[in-house]
Image (spheres, grey):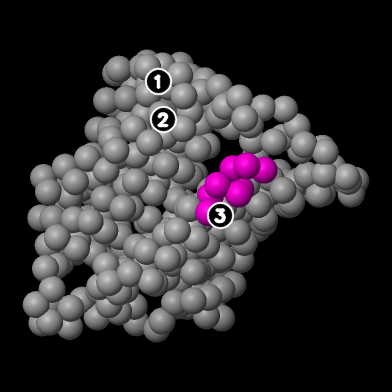
Amino acid sequence: MPSWPALASQAFNGLALGSLLALVSSGLTIILGTLGVLNFAHGALFAVGAYAAFVMLQYTQSFLLAIAVGCGFMLVLGFLLERLIIRFFYGRPHEDQILVTYGIGIVLVECVRAVFGGNAQRVPTPSWGQGATQLGFLIYPTYRLQLIAIIATLLVGLYLVLYRTSMGLVVRAGIENPGMVGILGINLRRTFLLVFAIGVVAVGLAGMLYAPVVAVTPDMGGANFMAQSFVVIVLGGLGSFPGAVVGGLIAGEIVSLTSAFNSSYSEVMLYALMALLLVLRPQGLFGSEGRV
């Protein structure tokens, strides 16, 4: 039985992991809900974002500037992927989408490996995030606390864009009824391009923010990471932004707290919860029946 301080530490770790999964899955679920595209390149884009931060940091020596330039790079990458490849797969069977996005993921990972090699790279913790913070009952790494706050701010910002702007209204209408949005004369092509690019920036930004916490490798967004992201959107409900946030937090806490008792069962508990939820509520916590 772990001690209470150990459990509290794992709970904070779960919050950090959950917020990261929420940011990653929000991009994934927006793309799936609006465009109907199962993006299996999402994990590779997470790694590309981490490497973007690594490279930009070498030139700028500023973590914040590296993040800003890195987001610009991910935005351009998202535009290129959507215009050159993804747009040809709208309305195609999910099997085709899985194959093409899985292939994109492999190409991106191998490009990264060809440039940087297979060895792990290190992104240093920014100066304002170094050290540990005394919480009274726990001493916890400062950057991880800041990471939770930063991602929470980003998710609130994404919520405001989706729920308080005309563009967000079009995106949510596209999730609920894409046919109706087209009939109303809204430029779906431009909306789809923007939605895909936002999803790519979200996952890339998650990779950049997480880079100081873990070793940066070409495979850091591999199968396990992708599986957890898809479990999150299944838990929260396909196409649901609030569902991605809540699902991410639940997944992060389950994985982290179970690891405090026995790490071998952390993934088992996560998939067991998903199976139970699919039986009791197939549309997920915030999803609608028949969506996607």
Q: Which residue is mark 1?
A: 60
Which is closer to the viewer, label 3 or label 2?
2
Q: Kindly state the secondary structure of the residue where label 1 is placed.
A: helix
- Does residue 264 appear anywhere in the picture? no
Identify residue type, mark 2: Leu
> Magenta region's main secondary structure?
helix
Of marks 1 and 3, which one's residue comes earlier in the chain? 1
Give the spatial CA distance, label 1 vs label 3: 26 Å
Percent across and percent down for residue 25 are 44, 56
What x and y, as percent, mark residue 30?
Answer: 34, 63
The residue nearer to you, when weighing 83 against 64, is 64
Assess whether mark 2 and mark 1 are in contact (beta carbons under 8 angstroms): yes
- Which residue is found at the position 56% from the left and 73% from the top? 277
Q: Which residues are magenta?
A: 145-153
Query: Given the image, on which type of amino acid does mark 3 rest?
Result: Ala
Across and down, in percent, residue 3 comes to: 90, 46
Q: Which residue is mark 2?
A: 65
Which residue: 56% across, 81% down?
280
List x then y, in percent, for residue 16. Answer: 62, 47
